[in-house]
Image (cartoon, rainbow, N blue to C red):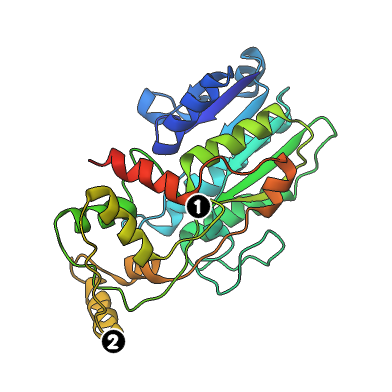
């Protein structure tokens, strides 16, 4: 089994390469950081390298600082995916795995997110991911080919540089968590669980084409996440319940000047987003190997 992996030098890509190689899968990594251009991937290259699976991880990540413009999101997340898929269709490869995002479905929801809900993304990031999904799903496939679209919840693991690291730094510096008044439940996705799912899909051709959500089995509140961080650091958690009206006001100011909080970051830290992994678990026939608390403990311990 030979797998072409785009975005191989990124956070997820590095974990994925290690996981695939540990499962005796031969990888052909592609990354701009390694001097490759994705336009270098051709039908001839796919066939000459005897690629069985294209694992498309490359993309423009969610930008909480609003640095990237809308056009760039569509160029990277949508057009690049369309171009690579068009080459896949005419190649000898049998499986195309696209790493989308749960943000292609929704940015927040009171409902548990399942694959049969109608997408309604609000961010440009989510809309660009959904545009790529729609293109893939509208293509005709022969019986010899399949396309798998994966929508993970927020992925975390060793080397993670997102909001989880920000929360860790707050607790590590002895600062209080001021957003205790916000009650929420959010699903996360251990990078180990994501790698597990991809390995299972690659090894099991009976898993059908379609969209699959990936998340740890249980969601967790941000307040409990603060407690988990404090446990790793052997500290007493300091959770304050600052008035919501004051926090929301400061977040709006943070949209215009540099503050530790802005509306985008506040939304990610305090809103609820629960993701069902029932469909992929049923398709694989196995539970996720890493629980949310186990995965968080490993990740948080790696920050020390």
Front residue of this view, candidates 202 and 46: 202
> Of callouts 1 and 2, which one flags the residue occurring earlier in the amino acid sequence?
1
Q: Is residue 14 above or below residue 250?
A: above
- Residue 60 in sight from this viewpoint: no
Q: Is residue 274 visible?
A: yes
Which picture quadrant has residue 295? top left
Badge 2, how many Cα within 10 Å: few under 14, some, many 20+? few
x, y (%) of residue 283? 74, 43
Q: Nearer the viewer, residue 181 or 129?
A: 181
* Residue at which label 1 appears: 74
Instruction: Look at the numbered disc 2 and give the secondary structure of its residue.
Output: helix
> Observer-nearest residue: 35 or 193?
193
Q: Element at badge 1?
A: helix
Residue at 36% over, 56% down: 63
- Disc number lying in front (1 or 2): 2
The quarter of the displayed image where residue 98 is located? top right
x and y percentages locating residue 61 in the rendered image = 42, 49
294 left or right, relative to 164 = right
Query: How many C-alpha atoms fall within 10 Å of the one at disc 1: few (<14), some, or many (≥20)?
Result: many
Residue at the spot x=61%, y=67% of the render? 112
Structural distance between the alpha carbons of marks 1 and 2: 35 Å
Q: Quadrant of the C terminus?
A: top left
From the viewer's perspective, is residue 154 above or below residue 144? below
Q: Which residue is mark 2?
A: 245
Disc 1 to disc 2: CB gap under 8 Å: no
């Amino acid at each position: 089994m030979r797998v072409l992996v785009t975005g191989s030098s990124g956070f997820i890509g590095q974990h994925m390469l290690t996981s695939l190689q540990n499962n005796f899968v031969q990888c052909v990594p592609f990354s701009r950081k390694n001097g490759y251009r994705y336009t270098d991937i051709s039908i001839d290259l796919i066939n000459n390298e005897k690629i069985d699976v294209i694992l498309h991880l490359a993309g423009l990540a969610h930008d909480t600082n609003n640095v990237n413009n809308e056009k760039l999101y569509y160029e990277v997340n949508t057009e690049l995916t369309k171009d690579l898929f068009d080459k896949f269709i005419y190649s000898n490869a049998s499986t195309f795995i696209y790493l989308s995002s749960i943000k292609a479905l929704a940015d927040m929801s009171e409902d548990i997110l399942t694959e049969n809900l109608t997408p309604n993304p609000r961010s440009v990031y989510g809309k660009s991911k959904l545009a790529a999904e729609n293109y893939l799903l509208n293509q005709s496939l022969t019986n010899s080919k399949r396309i798998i679209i994966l929508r993970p919840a927020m992925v975390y693991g060793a080397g993670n540089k997102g909001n989880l690291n920000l929360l860790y730094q707050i607790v590590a510096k002895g600062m209080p968590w001021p957003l205790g008044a916000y009650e929420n439940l959010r699903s996360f996705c251990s990078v180990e669980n994501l790698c597990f799912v991809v390995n299972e899909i690659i090894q099991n051709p009976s898993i059908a084409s379609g969209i699959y959500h990936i998340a740890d089995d249980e969601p967790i509140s941000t307040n409990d996440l603060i407690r988990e961080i404090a446990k790793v650091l052997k500290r007493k958690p300091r959770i304050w319940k600052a008035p919501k009206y004051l926090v929301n006001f400061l977040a709006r100011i943070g949209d215009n000047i540099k503050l530790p909080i802005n509306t985008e970051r506040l939304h990610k830290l305090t809103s609820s987003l629960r993701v069902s992994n029932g469909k992929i678990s049923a398709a694989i026939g196995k539970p996720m190997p890493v629980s949310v608390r186990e995965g968080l403990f490993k990740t948080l311990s790696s920050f020390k």
